[in-house]
Image: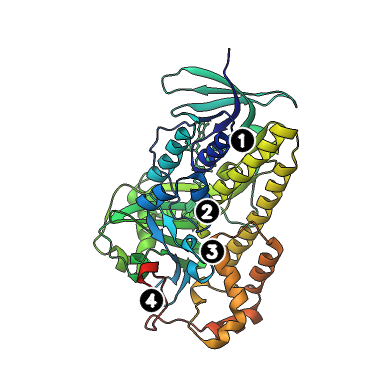
């Protein structure tokens, strides 16, 4: 007989493991089917402060604190570093939650998945789901999987959760994946470096986002990880990358054009080159492409889609892990309600809140790339007293950068709209002033370094 579980979860990334732990805590028998053998590398290493409470709730906060570097804020800079703005989370969040984390994903995802195991979840690594039958209302979900040795497995569950990340197992099977039409098709190239010369904001733990501007619609991230490891990634408009491919393939060959493009774009930024100095790469450049999509229908009678499998937006604001973990928590509550009362209202509310959150992030992303919008690197509180007038707008942006996506969507959308109005941009710039490289700036300090 096939084993019957309450919930089967496809994928053991942060979304899947959070979901599994929450369900096990609620007394359900959960099975995670994960195709990879953990620890496995993954992109996406910078976390939002709003993850903090989720770590505490899951019971992993102390482990996360012990193993990963701390992130007090975000620094946006222009390509040559002549302008930059520092967004320190402790300006809008009181308490220890203001200090977020950066983590090497192989270690972070493994920590969460091992924790699920300890909470009673059955986890099968190296088990790839190959087929699913959802059946009719009232039916269990049938799940078919395969091991690397070719062993075929069958499972059954009352409910199925797809947390398969960008593999998007159910949206592809159901044929309901759509692009976010307002967002450009993009690609990312990334790598870890050792012996980089961290500037002050990186040394203090900030993620640094360097805007390349122009037709590239590109930006570079720098994330300080532990053990002298700096993650440097590049996100670019796909059409620009494809043009460059034609040029660079001639010189570097069809297999090496991505690495050549990565190095070429890093070299275009004096501030990035200063930080790289004589640093060396740990491995070859890794490519991730064609992101920004959503599943049109995200849940049904016996299934739900969460995390990257449900939707993915441009990663400029480091929102993916938080969105996935928060979705897992909200949908786990929804599943509990369905099991108890056959009532889908909690699930519906969860997806409505998520839709609002994604809308806010989509608007924020469009603002970042819109040439007539305010440049994030230009927004800086230079201590001018009159800046108080804009305190609330500034706080709203701060809160969004910290991850406050699920509440008060309309208020946030209005605030983002402000940044697209030339009149408001001029006012804002006058009040906040342009920060020149030689001006003293307020960087984000770790709490023990603050007076
Ligand atoms: C360029 C780039 C930069 C990013 N930067 C950040 C960042 O700084 N901060 C941030 O928060 N987010 C970032 N993200 C997003 C972040 O990586 C994701 O949002 C996050 O990993 C989502 O977690 P998840 O659990 O939903 O999916 P994943 O972490 O991808 O986990 C899905 C798991 O499912 C497994 N799986 C897939 N198919 C199957 C199958 N058929 N059977 C069994 N298992 C399967 C996979 O092996 C994988 O382990 C970035 C993304 C990109 C592309």
Secondary structure state at the residue bearing disc 4: loop
Compute the Cα span from label 1 to label 4.
53 Å
Query: Where, by quadrant of the figure, is residue 372 drawn?
Result: bottom right
Mark 4 burial class by Cα count in 10 Å: few <14, some 14-19, many 20+:
few
**Left or right placement of residue 413 versus residue 192 in this view:** right
- Name the mark nearer the viewer: 1 or 4: 4
Which residue position is annotated with label 4?
451
Residue 424 image offset from top left, x and y in percent? 64, 80
Q: Is residue 369 visible?
A: no
Label 3: few (<14), some (14–19) or many (≥20) C-alpha neighbours in 10 Å: many
Q: Is residue 283 left or right of residue 294?
A: left
- Disc 4 or 3, which lies upstream in sequence? 3
Q: Position of residue 25 (x, y in %)?
A: 55, 37
Alpha-carbon span between mark 2 and mark 3: 16 Å
Q: Nearer the viewer, mark 1 or mark 2?
A: 2
Location of residue 168 in the rendering, given as x and y in whole percent from the top left corner? 57, 38
Task: Tell me which numbered mark, 3 or 1, is placed earlier along the sequence.
Answer: 1
Residue carrying label 3: 401
Which one is in front in this view, the residue at disc 4 or the one at disc 3?
4
Q: Is any part of residue 291 visible from this angle?
A: yes
The reply to whether the C-beta atoms of the residues labelled 1 and 2 are less than 8 Å apart is no
Query: Which residue is labeled 2 in the image?
Result: 53
């Amino acid at each position: 007989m096939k084993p019957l579980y309450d919930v089967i979860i496809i994928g053991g990334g942060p979304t899947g493991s959070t979901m599994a732990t929450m369900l096990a805590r609620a007394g359900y028998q959960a099975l995670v089917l994960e195709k990879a053998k953990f620890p496995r590398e993954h992109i996406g290493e910078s976390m939002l402060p709003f993850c903090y409470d989720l770590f505490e709730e899951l019971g992993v906060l102390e482990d996360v604190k012990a193993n990963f570097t701390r992130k007090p804020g975000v620094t946006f800079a222009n390509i040559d570093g002549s302008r930059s703005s520092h967004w320190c989370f402790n300006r809008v969040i009181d308490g220890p939650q203001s200090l977020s984390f950066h983590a090497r994903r192989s270690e972070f995802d493994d920590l969460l998945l091992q924790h699920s195991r300890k909470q009673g979840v059955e986890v099968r690594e190296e088990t790839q789901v190959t087929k699913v039958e959802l059946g009719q209302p009232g039916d269990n979900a049938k799940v078919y999987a395969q091991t690397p040795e070719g062993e075929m497995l069958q499972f059954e569950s009352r409910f199925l959760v797809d947390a398969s990340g960008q593999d998007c197992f159910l949206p592809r099977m159901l044929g309901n994946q759509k692009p976010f039409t307002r967002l450009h098709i993009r690609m990312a190239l990334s790598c870890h470096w050792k012996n980089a010369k961290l500037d002050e904001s990186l040394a203090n733990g900030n993620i640094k986002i360097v805007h390349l501007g122009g037709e590239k619609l590109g930006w570079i991230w720098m994330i300080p990880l532990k053990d002298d490891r700096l993650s440097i990634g590049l996100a670019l408009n796909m059409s620009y990358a494809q043009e460059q491919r034609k040029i660079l393939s001639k010189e570097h060959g069809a297999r090496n054009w991505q690495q050549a493009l990565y190095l070429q774009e890093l070299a275009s930024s004096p501030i990035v080159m200063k930080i790289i100095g004589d640093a060396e790469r740990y491995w070859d450049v890794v490519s991730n492409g064609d992101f920004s999509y959503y599943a049109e229908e995200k849940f049904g009678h016996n299934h739900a889609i969460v995390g990257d499998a449900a939707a993915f937006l441009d990663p400029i604001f480091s929102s993916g892990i938080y969105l996935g973990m928060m979705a897992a928590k909200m949908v786990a509550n929804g599943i509990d309600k369905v099991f108890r009362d056959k009532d889908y209202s909690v699930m519906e509310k969860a997806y409505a809140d998520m839709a609002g959150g994604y809308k806010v992030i989509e608007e924020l992303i469009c603002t970042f790339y819109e040439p007539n919008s305010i440049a994030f690197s230009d927004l800086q509180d230079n201590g001018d007293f009159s800046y108080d007038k804009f305190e609330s707008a500034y706080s709203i942006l701060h809160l969004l950068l910290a991850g406050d996506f699920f509440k008060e969507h309309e208020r946030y959308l209005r605030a983002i709209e402000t940044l697209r109005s030339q009149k408001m941009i001029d006012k804002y710039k006058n009040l906040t002033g342009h920060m020149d490289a030689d001006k003293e700036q307020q960087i984000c300090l770790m709490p023990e370094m603050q007076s």
